[in-house]
Image (cartoon, grey):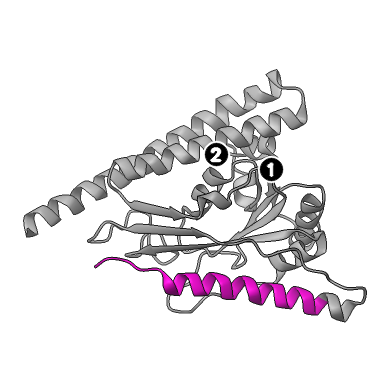
Amino acid sequence: MRLMKSLDHAWRLLATALGFTVFGIGGLIMGLLIFPLMFVFIGDVELRKFTARRLVGRAFGAFWRMMYILRILDYEIKGRERIDPGRCQLIVANHPTLIDVVLLISLFPRANCVIKKAVTENIFMRSVVRAADYISNSAPEELLESCAAYLEAGGSLILFPEGTRSQQGQGMNFKPGAAAAAARAGVEVLPIAIECKPLFLSKELPWYYVPDERPVFKVSILTAIPAVDQGADLSTARQARHELNSMIFRRICDELTSMEFSD
């Protein structure tokens, strides 16, 4: 039994390196060849954006399937029936691991998302970001306005209220920006709870760390929270945003608490 566990761990270490190597090579090919060609052959901006996001979503979905096939991880997604590609909503989730955004974009390929400034300036990724028209966080003071404007225009948007990956042992801290964008745009919020045990690809761990047991991701797509009414005056609007942020936090926390993992 000990030998089998050692062999399984060694394989997952090798497979993890292989998986991220494939991910990196795929990113290079897409960023340097496929997406630049979109600007040459697809002149219509909306068609190019739709095509780019769909391609990113399929590539990310293929990455998750590869991770599963290689036995790097297992995953379970609950609430798929709540996915509505044509619905305008703010999609929010907690952020325990490095690949949460990969999973969410694979599930919601039409949705926009906020990309770190470093990604938008990366020579290999900037054509991807431009073609898909993802929102950059390079101007934090304008980020809330950009997100609210996109939602008001009828699009869906993926946001992590924590702003960065969760700090293990410190609890979650949901910043009010996501709730403020949803309230300002008057759109519903779709909360998603994500948990991974044992810990894998967290903020404290390098990508090459492989736990003794195969990690299991559990993802719950919860019931949407209806759009809130901000009211006419500033104090009422502030209170509405605060209550929405608290509701999102409670929904996700309650679901995380109820998740069961086999020993």
- SS class of the residue under badge 1? loop
- Front-lying residue, 241 or 226: 226
The x, y position of residue 8, in whole percent, is 17, 51
Q: Is residue 27 above or below residue 154?
A: above
What span is in magenta?
A: 238-263
Q: Please, which residue is most extreme toward the right here?
A: 232
Q: Residue furthest top?
A: 41
Image quadrant where residue 247 sits:
bottom right
Image coordinates of residue 35 in percent, x first then y, are: 61, 28
Q: Secondary structure at mark 2?
A: helix
Q: Answer whether residue 59 is visible to the viewer in this image.
A: yes
Which numbered disc covers residue 182?
none
Mark in front: 2 vs 1: 1
The residue where tag 2 is placed is: 57
Q: Residue at x 62, y 37 (%)?
A: 53
Res 173 seen here? no
